[in-house]
Amino acid sequence: MSLNTFDDDFNDDDINDALSEYVDDFKDLDDEAKQLDDLEDLRQEVNKSDSFATQLDEILGEKAKSALLLSPFQDGKLLAAFCAVADIQASCISSNTGSVAFLKDCDGQQPEKSAQSLTEMVAGLSVILITNRADQLSAYIWDDGKQGESCVPPLLFMQVDDYVEDYMIGALDLTTLDQIGSPIYQSSDYTKEQAFEIIQHYTGC
């Protein structure tokens, strides 16, 4: 094709129309990009709103900032198995002074319900529930599904590993528990069948 033929096939109007289509396509892409940016901004605002609502619940005491169960079991894996059977979401750690279950659901009275469920399920088991609501620490003994005597948190912290107090005052959280350096057993990792097998292995029954 010669240059003259090219000029004959594509006049100025054709070229302008083609360029106009490209410009429109770029505008469409720009609009889509702006929509994606708007969606991302909206997602971030929703996350901020959820975070603010959680913080407000914690300030008002509607949601515990942190809660854990102190058990007489030395092995955190056994405690995690019992939590799995009782439908308690927790991260459990072994300790010579008694394994600890860091509760994941701290809404409303859920920490108390967890202590109730665990001690109702395991006959003769007593646990200590420690909660931090609106920066107020409380600790109670739970036995046979009922809340019993209160404990003085500072005195209690002197008898357990340091990380218990660190967690309750906010120096540690569920995302930084691995700093303790001990194995962490998640109750959610076990089906109830697996949990029963673990319990049978430890108890022999």
Image: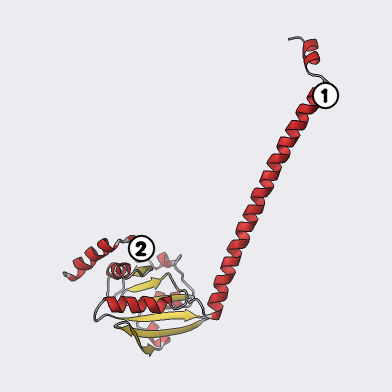
Name the residue rendered at 71%, 35% in the picture. 25
Q: What's the distance in space between the residues labelled 2 and 1, CA to CA? A: 68 Å
Q: Which of the two discs, 2 and 1, labels the residue nearer the N terminus? A: 1
Nearer the observer, 167 or 126: 126
Mark seen at residue 13:
1
What residue is pinned by disc 2? 188
Quadrant holding the N terminus: top right
Q: Is residue 137 left or right of residue 97?
A: right
Q: Is residue 63 above or below residue 12?
A: below
Name the residue rendered at 31%, 76% in the picture. 118
Q: Is residue 189 above or below residue 69?
A: above
Quadrant holding the C terminus: bottom left
Name the residue rendered at 73%, 32% in the picture. 22
Describe the element under mark 2 as helix, strand or loop: helix
Residue 184 visible in image: no
Rendering quarter of residue 138: bottom left
Name the residue rendered at 70%, 40% in the picture. 28
Residue 97, image x, y percentages: 30, 78
Residue 161, image x, y percentages: 36, 77
Amino acid of disc 2: Ser
**Quick one: which residue is furthest to the top in this view?**
2
How does the figure colour the protein chain or chains?
secondary structure
Nearer the observer, 64 or 21: 21
Q: Is residue 199 left or right of residue 33?
A: left
Q: Is residue 46 above or below residue 62?
A: above
Residue 202, image x, y percentages: 20, 69
Describe the element under mark 1 as helix, strand or loop: helix
Amino acid of disc 1: Asp
Q: Is residue 72 above or below residue 76?
A: below
